[in-house]
Image: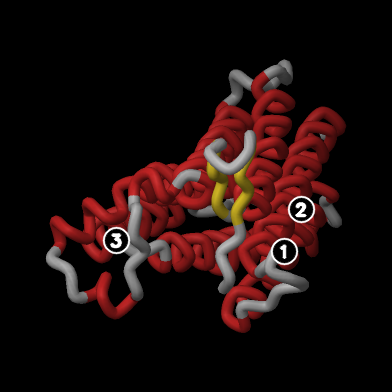
Amino acid sequence: MELTQWILGGKDGLLIEEPMTALTDFLVTAVCILGLVKFSRHGEFEKRQLRVFAWFFFFMGLGTLFAGLFTHAFSYIFVPERLSKETLSALEYNEKLSYNLHNLPNWVFNVVSVTLFEISNVIMIKKYLSKLNTAIYYSVIAVESLAVYVLLLTVLKYDIAIAHIGFALYLIALPLQIAVYKKYRSKYAKFMIFGILIMLITPPVMALKFEFCKWFNFNDISHVVIAATMYCFMLAGEKFVEEKLEN
C-alpha cells in the first residue's frame, strides 16, 4: 500500500498521513455521535435497553476517533519508523507494547464497544423473545470478552479485535435477530440484519487489499461500510423504540 499524505501550510506545515483513512474514520465517529445523541436524549434512555445501546455508539465513536488521529493521521509522532511484520514479530513484548501504545486506545475502545453491542442485543431482544435464556448469553459474552481482552494485550494485534467483531455479529447478534424477524417481521430486526450483512463486504476487501486508487484504499472502503452499518444500527434503534411504544 502506497502511503498518502497531506502537508497543510506549506513545505514545513502540518503533516497528515493517510488523510482519507483518517477522514473515513471520522465519518464513522460522526455517525456514532449522532446515534449517541439520538438515544441518550430519548425519553426511554433511563431504561437499560437504550442506555447500553447508546454506550455502544459512544465507545465505537471513541475508537474510530483515536484510530483516525493516532493510528493514521499522526502515527509518525508515536512511531517515526514503520516496522515490517517480520521485524515486529521478532521484538520482545515490552518493545511491541511500546510500538503499539498509540494503537491501544482504538483497539481497547473498539473491543469495549463490541462487547456492549453484544449485551445490548440480548437486552433488546428479550422484549421480543421473552423465553430467551439471557444468563447463558451473558456468560458466553463475559467469557469471550475476557478472553479477547487478555489476548489483545498479550498478542498486541488488531486481528483479535476483528475476531471479536465477527463473533459478536455472526454468532451472537445475527441468529437472534433472524429469530425475531421470523417471528414478528420486526423492522428493528430487519435493520439490524441488514447492517450486519453489510459488514460481510469488509473481509474480502481487506484480504484482497482492494482499492479504487491510492487515495481510496481498502481501509477507506471498510470505514465507509462500517459507517453504513452504524447508520443501519441507528435506524434499528429507532424502530425498536417505535415497536416498543406500539406494543
Residue to which mark 2 is pinned:
228
Q: Secondary structure at mark 3?
A: loop
Residue to which mark 3 is pinned:
156
Residue sitting at x 13%, y 66%: 92
Look at the picture and state if 164 lies above or below 208.
Answer: above
Q: How is the image coloured?
A: secondary structure
Label 1 packing within 10 angstroms: few (<14), some (14-19), many (20+): some
Residue sitting at x 62%, y 83%: 208
Residue to which mark 1 is pinned:
216
- Give residue 40's quadrant in the image: top right
Residue sitting at x 77%, y 72%: 212
Q: Nearer the viewer, residue 117 or 60?
A: 60
Is residue 117 visible in the rendered image? The answer is no
* Whole-number angstrom distance, CA of label 2 to CA of label 1: 17 Å
Residue 96 locus on image (x, y percent): 22, 60
Q: Amino acid at mark 3?
A: Leu
Counting residues from the N terminus, which is met first, the one under dot 2 or under dot 3?
A: 3
Q: Give yes or no for contact between labels 1 and 3 (Cβ–Cβ under 8 Å).
A: no
